[in-house]
Image (cartoon, rainbow, N blue to C red):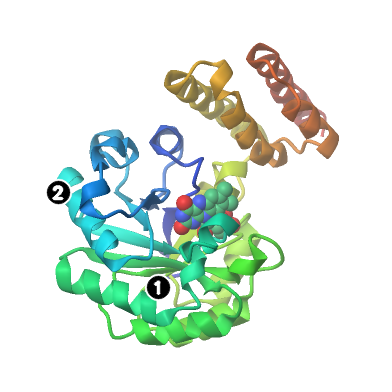
């Protein structure tokens, strides 16, 4: 049953997948059902100014429902932030990030830095359950240093009525290196009574189908970097067939120019350049650029030149496709 009706989530990617990007994506690609917004920090009420979190404003999210995500480790700050977001924007779901592996976050015992401390996690969940009516969910990894951490947390969480758990099957110390550890993921889900969302390295149809085969009990799949590289991936996964490359390129072009425009509306064109470069690190794969070609794009410092060179990349790729 779950195999035939997968539910697709768009992953939070801090620095990238904000409303101005999500909206362009969702207007060009159907089949996403849910999204989690990149994290915002939890604060006690005297330090909160939730109005400034325009990314969470439902008016800025007309396409599909998003779930706000919090980063923090103080139960009071997390409760205060949940209540403030709920009252400002009306959300009834909030996600807590205990998976972020960035050193400066882990060092402060936030993100994945809380995973070696199951009692802290239980405190937060306990307090949120007692003090709010929010549907609370968690996005986590296998652990920071060992998959034993994740299993311990999962067992403790079984007694709480969580909305769902998103699991990225790597350790925090791995950052994004190495293979996903599906055996440890399996151990975690076998120990859990929660709804599980799988997140990690779903980069093409083959990978997705083999994950579906191995985990028939999973219905919810989260896509992140794979969609940055190829925005139409979700359509291929949903329909179970690869799309035609030439048609994809035509659609990609219109997606890309709209995305570029959306970034230019936020800042001056020149100031949008770093964000565009960040995206091209992912697009390089779509265009099958060599490392040298990508580096030469990333070295450009003037937006006009950047636009010209990236236009050439489109034309070159289209010609390559035609001569294949
Ligand atoms: C640049 C970057 C930023 C990320 N930001 C967040 C974030 O704000 N919150 C979060 O829970 N996960 C974050 N993640 C993790 C992703 O949501 C996702 O779980 C991970 O990239 C694995 O999925 P993928 O292989 O489909 O990208 C981030 C990952 C990357 C690479």
Horizontal arrangement in the rendering, residue 307 relative to residue 6 (left or right): right
Choose between 10 and 173: the one closer to the eye.
Answer: 173
Residue 176: give x, y in percent of width and height.
Answer: 65, 60
Precedes in sequence: disc 2 or disc 1: 1
Horizontal arrangement in the rendering, residue 28 relative to residue 292 (left or right): left
Q: Residue at x 46, y 86 (%)?
A: 152
* Placement of the N terminus among the 4 image quadrants: bottom left
Residue 213: give x, y in percent of width and height.
Answer: 56, 74
- Mark 2 or 1: in front is 2
Choose between 131 and 168: the one closer to the eye.
Answer: 131
As helix, strand or loop, the secondary structure at mark 1 comes to loop
Mark 1, other Cα within 10 Å: few <14 / some 14–19 / many ≥20: few
Q: Which residue is mark 2?
A: 87
Q: Residue at x 37, y 86 (%)?
A: 156
- Total count of labels: 2
Q: Which residue is mark 1?
A: 1
Choose between 203 and 89: the one closer to the eye.
Answer: 89
């Amino acid at each position: 049953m779950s195999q035939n009706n997968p539910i697709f989530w768009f992953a939070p990617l801090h620095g990238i997948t904000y409303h101005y990007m999500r909206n362009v994506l969702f207007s060009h690609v159907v089949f996403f059902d849910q999204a989690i917004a990149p994290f915002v920090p939890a604060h006690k009420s005297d330090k909160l100014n939730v109005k400034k979190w325009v990314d969470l404003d439902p008016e800025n999210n007309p396409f599909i429902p998003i779930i706000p995500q919090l980063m923090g480790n103080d139960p009071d700050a997390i409760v205060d932030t949940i209540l403030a977001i709920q009252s400002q924007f009306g959300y009834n779901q909030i996600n807590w990030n205990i998976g972020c592996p960035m050193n400066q976050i882990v060092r402060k015992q936030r993100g994945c830095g809380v995973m070696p401390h199951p009692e802290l996690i239980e405190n937060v969940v306990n307090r949120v359950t007692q003090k709010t009516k929010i549907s609370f969910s968690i996005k986590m990894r296998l652990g920071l240093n060992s998959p034993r951490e994740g299993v311990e947390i999962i067992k403790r969480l079984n007694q709480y009525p969580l909305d769902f758990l998103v699991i990225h099957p790597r350790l925090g110390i791995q950052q994004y290196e190495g293979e996903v550890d599906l055996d440890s993921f399996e151990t975690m889900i076998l120990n859990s009574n929660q709804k599980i969302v799988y997140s990690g390295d779903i980069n093409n149809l083959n990978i997705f189908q083999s994950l579906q085969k191995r985990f028939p009990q999973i219905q919810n799949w989260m896509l992140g970097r794979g969609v940055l590289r190829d925005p139409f991936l979700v359509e291929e996964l949903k329909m179970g067939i690869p799309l035609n490359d030439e048609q994809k390129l035509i659609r990609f072009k219109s997606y890309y120019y709209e995305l570029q425009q959306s970034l230019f509306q936020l800042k001056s064109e020149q100031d949008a350049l770093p964000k565009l470069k960040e995206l091209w690190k992912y697009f390089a794969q779509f265009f099958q650029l060599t490392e040298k070609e990508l580096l030469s794009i990333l070295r450009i410092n003037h937006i006009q030149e950047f636009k010209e060179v990236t236009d050439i990349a489109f034309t070159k790729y289209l010609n390559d496709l035609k001569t294949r």
